[in-house]
Image (cartoon, rainbow, N blue to C red):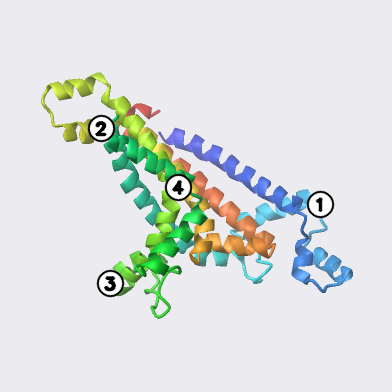
Amino acid sequence: MLQFFTRRLAFLMFVVVGITLLTFVISHIIPADPAAVVAGPNAREEQIQELRKLMKLDRPLHEQYLRYLTGLLRGDLGTSVRSHRPVRDHLSQLFPATLELTLVAMILYTVVGVPLGILIAVRQGTWVDSLTRIAALAGVALPEFWLALVLQLIFYRQLGWLPSGGRLDVMSSPPQQITGLYLVDSVLTLNGQTFVDSLRHLVLPAIALTMGRIATLIRITRVSIIHILSQDYIRVARAKGLREWTIISHHALKNALVPIITIIGLQVGWLLNGAVLVETVFSWPGVGQYAVTSISFLDIPAIMGVTLTVAVLFVLINLMTDFLYIVVDPRLRP
């Protein structure tokens, strides 16, 4: 097993290097001059050329790429053009907010998607099956930003039940920082009021982030459970008089977990990407909103830092998914 993960990790390292090369090339294809952005709109051409030399943008591309890789090995993601601060500092400050939103959305995604998939598999061909699939497909057709705006209109403006954005109310203070996740830090510091406040602010963004993707999990779960329920050992279990719920929970679900884990693992990465639009609509102070702001200011180092961070996380999630395959299904062990 160690050899298997060593090979996988080596392969993923090649993937990460490829991602760095791709982001570097794209940053130089974009018709924008970082030196001109730093110099400002009123800078003279001589000033821009001097900045290009200081930033070493006049060097050959292969030298610039090697310098970029060397910086990455030191943990240096570059310096933000807009704030003149290290991109690493921005990401370390903002990433906990994005991680918290993604984790809550992932929990909601799994808790709702898997049971609904099992339900419509057991009720295959009934009105429950048809209605659930239609509702799930309707969720796929709704763009995330549009759904986010509708949720704000209904639950904030019309009903006044939930806040429109941010992580906390204006008059609330963040909990003592331990992990950067407000829900976790509130529990660790026994701050119930902040926990409730942060949870209320998470509801709408998490729903907007989850709704458009949950249909995929429902369909995969439904197909997997239906396939398993048609196997001979399930018929034997029923012939022995086992209750249907026992058959599903102890036999069918366990053997249907591999495709379910696959889609859940992939969706974690897509949820991180989808957070860009959702964070912008809900003024969520995370990496997604930072990326949008950086794009509007043509902050190339910040854009590359966000892209590389999300890509590396996607790769690590795939590695964890491979590990879970082996845990849940011993037949896949090398």
Q: CA distance from mark 2 to mark 4?
A: 24 Å
- Residue assigned mark 4: 212
- Residue assigned mark 3: 192
Which residue shows up at 26% across the image and 26% down it? 229
Q: CA distance from mark 3 to mark 4?
A: 31 Å
Q: CA distance from mark 3 to mark 2?
A: 40 Å
Q: Mark 2 belongs to which amino acid?
A: Val
In the rendered structure, the answer to whether residue 71 lies left or right of residue 58 reads left
Depth check: 36 or 289 in front? 289
Residue 104 place in picture, x, y as percent: 38, 56
- Residue assigned mark 2: 122
**Disc with the residue nearer the chain's start (2 vs 4):** 2
Q: Quadrant of the C terminus?
A: top left
Q: Mark 3 belongs to which amino acid?
A: Gly
Give the label, 1 or 3, closer to the camera: 3
Say which element carries label 2: helix
Give the label, 1 or 4, closer to the camera: 4
Q: Is residue 150 above or below residue 220?
A: below
